[in-house]
Image: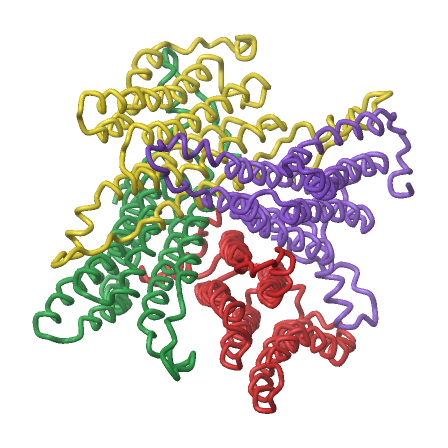
Chain colours: A red, B purple, C yellow, D green
Amino acid sequence: MDEPVDDHPPAGETVAQKQHRLFGRGRDTGRIEYFTDAVIAIAMTLLVLDIKLPELGKHETIFEALGRTWEQFFAYALSFVIIALNWVFHHRRFRAIVRYDSTLIWINLAFLLFIAVVPFPTSLLAEVGPTPEIITLYTGTLAIIGFLGGLCWWYAHRADLLSTTIDRELYVYILGSNLIAPVFFLLAIPLGFLLQAVGLDTGWALWFLLLNWAGGRIWARWRGRREVRHDPDGELAG
Amino acid sequence: MDEPVDDHPPAGETVAQKQHRLFGRGRDTGRIEYFTDAVIAIAMTLLVLDIKLPELGKHETIFEALGRTWEQFFAYALSFVIIALNWVFHHRRFRAIVRYDSTLIWINLAFLLFIAVVPFPTSLLAEVGPTPEIITLYTGTLAIIGFLGGLCWWYAHRADLLSTTIDRELYVYILGSNLIAPVFFLLAIPLGFLLQAVGLDTGWALWFLLLNWAGGRIWARWRGRREVRHDPDGELAG
Amino acid sequence: MDEPVDDHPPAGETVAQKQHRLFGRGRDTGRIEYFTDAVIAIAMTLLVLDIKLPELGKHETIFEALGRTWEQFFAYALSFVIIALNWVFHHRRFRAIVRYDSTLIWINLAFLLFIAVVPFPTSLLAEVGPTPEIITLYTGTLAIIGFLGGLCWWYAHRADLLSTTIDRELYVYILGSNLIAPVFFLLAIPLGFLLQAVGLDTGWALWFLLLNWAGGRIWARWRGRREVRHDPDGELAG
Amino acid sequence: MDEPVDDHPPAGETVAQKQHRLFGRGRDTGRIEYFTDAVIAIAMTLLVLDIKLPELGKHETIFEALGRTWEQFFAYALSFVIIALNWVFHHRRFRAIVRYDSTLIWINLAFLLFIAVVPFPTSLLAEVGPTPEIITLYTGTLAIIGFLGGLCWWYAHRADLLSTTIDRELYVYILGSNLIAPVFFLLAIPLGFLLQAVGLDTGWALWFLLLNWAGGRIWARWRGRREVRHDPDGELAG
């Protein structure tokens, strides 16, 4: 699959140039997608497998113990939903990315490294609780994942790896949708320290993560209303 | 793969509308299926990997120790079979689902969340035993998985994502087959509490899970006998 | 993918019959293969991840500690190789199996259940050592996997799921190659008890597992020498 | 998929010969690639999941504890990057490998065995630290992976499994790029013992691993500058 094509070999080409011409780019992103799916699936599933029943107190039923530790479940469910959201974005992104090069593969691998890291701050959040430091680690990881997703999209446009159906306006719109979530994630960090300073429950900062949904709405309303210019030559010139 | 098609762009379309037209639906469900397979495979395999040999008693052989803890193996095997059954249903369902949209993807991700949860109540069942509370958690999880599978099928029909080979009668028949199992699962919950109240072994309630097979037979006999109407226009009108 | 085809609907067909006609069989075994690969990959990888460094003795280097516990590594490597061998057989088998039905899927799922079980007796072997009981559990699991692989092949022939390139003689030859290994595996069980009875190291029985390679050679020599009859009508009649 | 083709059956063929003709080689490497991806994805993800927060000292913040144990993170990140690099090489290699036989499959399985082993020396490195013995185990494992990758490429050329776009010069160039990294890895072993002998921090030997990047540059400059001969008959004759 995705066998390299050796057409139009230029005269006087060196071996290194030939390797680059044959392998520098590829047309079938299938294997990149399935590899990504495998890593995301493992990170998501192991996240849930990490859930443990707390020690039962005296005269405590299992339901009471589960109720007492609902914050633990909230942490795992939140991470599951955010990784799932990143899978949905990745799935959509690679419908539009129809070619690849080495740089795109490495951006995607960096994205996967931080996906695989998510269970670590999640278990800190579940076991230690939402201190400002742990909120920083947790939302910092999520923000990096979001930015790497945006970087992937930005690079794909810059290196001409996108489908021709994506014109400049749509590219910018999707880039904005990709970046608005990690920006909102980062806002949770000062909020956590602020809540601690005024003596309130720092856990409220986590609910702030869900506001990225609101951010997406605002962006969609502000930018998404523009009409598409039907200028067939404007796609890459933009 | 599954590159968006930009045909018939309407005049005066906004960017948000264009994104929805290009990415709101897709034709190749392959990546959704393989991602699902990866999550199910991990949950199933880790389930079995959870099995531990009990501490050997004095003068006890390994076979005796395994025999003494057969209920543990029964719990894992039961969960394995039920997840396997859900894979079979999912496989069959996505032969008929030939398009997708975002809502279908999120229903499928919720289904996967609960698949990933299964090892948790299974290990409770294996380690603590079949108390009515644990039976509630265990069969509740299985019932939610079943209902989400049914919801996926219901939504696919409603949003016109099914193959045209599925007429309304076949759709209703399969929906019934999908929902009969979780209904039977839920019946195990009051049965567990009832068995406890009358002082009997609550473990019998788990055997009740296997009765969903009988439920499927009854449904197949009642509904499946109807003749198919050969009305080519009735498919979507139904 | 693998959308059901609704051709030649018979008059007076019931809904249950229509479901069976559309979904009872399928033509694309791709998803079955990838699901199998995911389960096998997880079982193989987690097997290796189970390896732990033994406690270092006083004045002991890491190499000495690893040397002292080489039997542990032997157990994991043996299981890895045998699961790998089963993957190779599965890969080859599903090149010839070009259709599937529900029964084939369930035989394959039973095969996967026992693949997922392998790390359990392997860790017993690594931690407790090759007692006759553990050899029985270990080689029993491997034999069941082998027999389920053979059952898969036997059933595929019986239910007409094989490629037409597989004539009866080749079918019988491959069935024999599939069954010879588990038969040799089973022979290790009485050997373990025999070695214990005469006071020898029961670990020798494990080397016997490698003899299944010799068994394959003997079978290939005895049966494989026969000439193929070129009788195009004999394929399914055989 | 990849159904065997039974064309030109020779007269007087035995069953064993027919099996070899039909199954000895195959044309679709897809399943080998996806199986490889699953194993690599699991090894990479579990590597990261192994990261644990150190015990917090008195008055120590989480950031200080993470800072104190940065070598642990370095070990995991290094292993992640090196496995990722091997995935990139494997991905590129199997674009050029367009056929397979049994030997290639077993070389690939041996490659996967050592990929699955990586988390073991990585956790030794993270927990015990960079003693010369552990550097030997760690870089030895990485070197074996590199050599098995090179063996895969060498064998694919020898057994005529490569795309015709790969001429002899490009084959030799890629073989060199594949082998330069493990050679540099092996150099870290004597360096570790040397650093210990002169009383320096043995951890410096690990940075040496990153020099394989420099090795690749040197090789590319020395060999890659040669012009490609445009001799269409020279490809396999080379």
User: Which image quadrant: the C terminus of chain D?
Assistant: top left
Residue A136 appears at what percent x and percent y? 52, 79
Q: Nearer the viewer, residue A67 or C100?
A: A67
Quadrant hosting residue B125:
top right
In this view, D122 is above or below C140: below
Q: Nearer the viewer, residue C27 or C81?
A: C81
C100 displayed left or right of B187 = left
In this view, C209 is above or below D97: above
Q: Nearer the viewer, residue D227 or B109?
A: B109
B12 displayed left or right of D215 = right
C194 displayed left or right of D98 = left
Query: What residue is shown at x 32% (from left), y 17% (from top)?
Result: C220
Residue B33 appears at what percent x and percent y? 61, 47
Query: What residue is shown at x 70% (from left), y 75% (from top)?
Result: A216
Quadrant hosting residue C204:
top left
Query: What residue is shown at x 22% (from left), y 67% (from top)?
Result: D130
